[in-house]
Image (cartoon, rainbow, N blue to C red):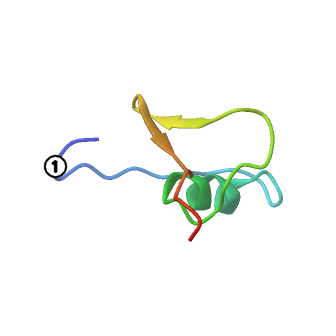
Amino acid sequence: MGENENWAIIGNNGTGKTTFMRLIFGELIPVYGGEVRWFGNKKGLRSRR
């Protein structure tokens, strides 16, 4: 993603758009299935204190 670019995530109801964004921003931690990567960077792996 570059400066001054606009992106959109589109899809039907219930297809995981919000879940995807929560994973990207680290608000949701994957409980199974490996790891989430965004442009090669691990996401959704915020440490639990």
| Residue at the far left in the pictured view | 3
Residue at 58% x, 66% y is 27
Residue at 55% x, 51% y is 45
Q: Which residue is mark 1?
A: 3
Looking at the image, residue 6 lies above or below residue 34: below
| Residue at the far bottom in the pictured view | 49
State which quadrant residue 17 falls in. bottom right
Q: Position of residue 40 (x, y in %)?
A: 41, 28
Residue at 52% x, 58% y is 46
Q: 30 left or right of 21?
A: right
Residue at 65% x, 61% y is 28
Which image quarter holds the C terminus?
A: bottom right
| Residue at the far top in the pictured view | 40
Q: Position of residue 13 (x, y in %)?
A: 80, 60
Q: Position of residue 5 (x, y in %)?
A: 25, 49
| Residue at the far front in the pictured view | 49
How many callouts does the rendering have?
1
Kindly state the secondary structure of the residue where label 1 is placed: loop
Q: Amino acid type of disc 1? A: Glu
Looking at the image, residue 43 lies above or below residue 28: above
Q: How packed is label 1: few (under 14 Cα within 10 Å), some, or many (20 or more)?
A: few
Which image quarter holds the N terminus?
A: top left
Q: 38 left or right of 34?
A: left
